[in-house]
Amino acid sequence: MDTADNSTTHSPREAATSLVASWVDMWNGEYAIAEKIISPDNRVHAAMFDGGDGSAVGGVAGMVDLVTQMRSLMSDLVFSPEVGPLVDGDHVVVRWVATGHYGGGIPGAGAPVGTAVTFHGTDILRVSDARVVEYWLNADTLDLMTQLQVGAG
């Protein structure tokens, strides 16, 4: 994806579709694409596992670290779009489903390593110059933690 030309040579829908495809590829472990689609000034808004709000996650390296951390819990994690992209001005929204097998590492999880999990979420991306400059994550973490039996017991 040539990010410099994307905003001028494609319709907003085509540009959003291309960006979301690359975004999903990044979440599926293709980290090299991050520099092409994430702004160095990217900001994250998310409820983090450690209780933070995501404000400490920034730029390309921050996003790659976030994806790496999530994938460390489930190395075979696969994200797939369910709805979208929906485009509204400079915002792009995608509803996704993630499937994989728990690899361990979440404190208090009672589920055995290898437990199959499926959870959903919605990403809102603010885009400028064909790069993500702001990211809101809304994942069904309660569903994921329930499947992993966190605090059960």
Image (cartoon, rainbow, N blue to C red):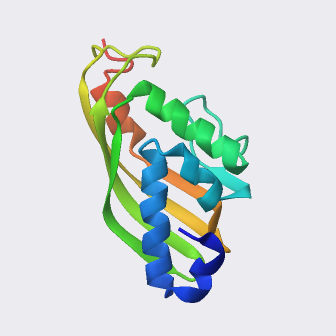
Q: Residue 20 at x, y = what percent?
A: 45, 64
Q: Nearer the viewer, residue 35 or 45?
A: 35
Q: Nearer the viewer, residue 44 or 13?
A: 13
Tell which residue pokes out farthest to the front in this image: 2
Using the rendered image of the protein, determine whether residue 37 is visible from the camera's viewpoint: yes
Q: Residue 42 at x, y = what percent?
A: 70, 56
Residue drawn at point x = 71 percent, y = 45 percent: 55
Give the answer, above or below, for where 108 lies relative to 2.
above
Residue drawn at point x = 36 percent, y = 20 percent: 103
Residue drawn at point x = 57 percent, y = 78 percent: 6
Total label count?
0
Q: Residue 28 at x, y = what percent?
A: 41, 45
Residue drawn at point x = 61 percent, y = 36 percent: 65
Give the answer, above or below, for where 38 lies relative to 27.
below
Give the answer, above or below, for where 41 lies relative to 14.
above
Q: Is residue 146 toward the left or the right of residue 54 in the image?
A: left
Q: Residue 136 at x, y = what percent?
A: 57, 56
Which of the 4 image quarters holds residue 150? top left
Using the rendered image of the protein, determine whether residue 54 is visible from the camera's viewpoint: no
Q: Is residue 39 toward the left or the right of residue 70 in the image?
A: right
Which of the 4 image quarters holds residue 102? top left
Which of the 4 image quarters holds residue 89? bottom right
Q: Quadrant of the C terminus?
A: top left
Q: Nearer the viewer, residue 49 or 38?
A: 38
Q: Is residue 53 toward the left or the right of residue 124 in the image?
A: right
Tell which residue pokes out farthest to the left in this image: 116
Q: Nearer the viewer, residue 24 or 106?
A: 24
